Amino acid sequence: MFFEFREYRIRDGKRQEWVDFMENKIIPYQTSKGMVVIGSFVGEEESDLYFWIRRFESEEQRIRLYDAVYESDHWKNVISPKVGEMMLRERIVVTRLEPTPRSVIR
């Protein structure tokens, strides 16, 4: 099992619109395809900072779910075009994390 910790930078003045889009469109769509979203967060001191965390059981599962989400017509034609309007894609940082034995988030 591993987690994907995703850090995004949001365009000026777009954070609330981004959060609404994530929570009402992106996260529900991805979970409908089998993704497990652990949490969604905004920076307390940085107005452009957004994080979210997804969990995967294996690399094979991650590949399968990525294909189901990101190769779909709905993602390509409906969701993806709106992402670039709110988020700075060139500043995405993705970190893969493995929980330690005593981590409660397993």
Image: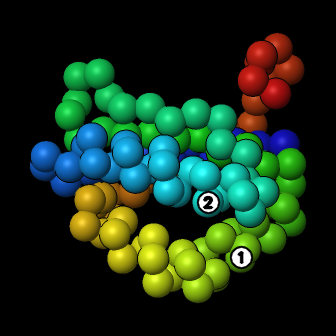
Q: Position of residue 6 (x, y in %)?
A: 50, 47
Q: Is residue 74 left or right of residue 88?
A: right
Residue 19 image label: none
Q: CA distance from mark 1 to mark 2?
A: 13 Å
Disc 2 target residue: 29
Rate crowding at label 1 as few (under 14), some (14 to 19) or many (20 or more) other CA atoms within 10 Å: few
Determine the image quadrant of residue 51.
top left
In this view, the residue in front, 4 or 50, is 50
Indicate how the structure is coloured in the image. Answer: rainbow
Disc 1 target residue: 67
At 54% from the left and 75% from the top, the residue drawn is 75
Tell me the mark number nearer the camera, choosing from 1 and 2.
2
State the SS at label 2. helix
Amino acid type, label 1: Asp
- Residue 35's place in the image compared with 23, above or below, is below
Rate crowding at label 2 as few (under 14), some (14 to 19) or many (20 or more) other CA atoms within 10 Å: some
- Residue 53's place in the image compared with 100, above or below, is below
At 84% from the left and 61% from the top, the residue drawn is 61
At 52% from the left and 57% from the top, the residue drawn is 26
Determine the image quadrant of residue 86.
bottom left
Determine the image quadrant of residue 29.
bottom right
At 23% from the left and 22% from the top, the residue drawn is 45
Q: Is residue 105 left or right of residue 49?
A: right
Amino acid type, label 2: Tyr
On the question of residue 96 being in view, the answer is no
Q: Position of residue 32 (x, y in %)?
A: 72, 58
Mark toward the start of the polypeptide (1 vs 2): 2
For the N terminus, the image quarter is top right
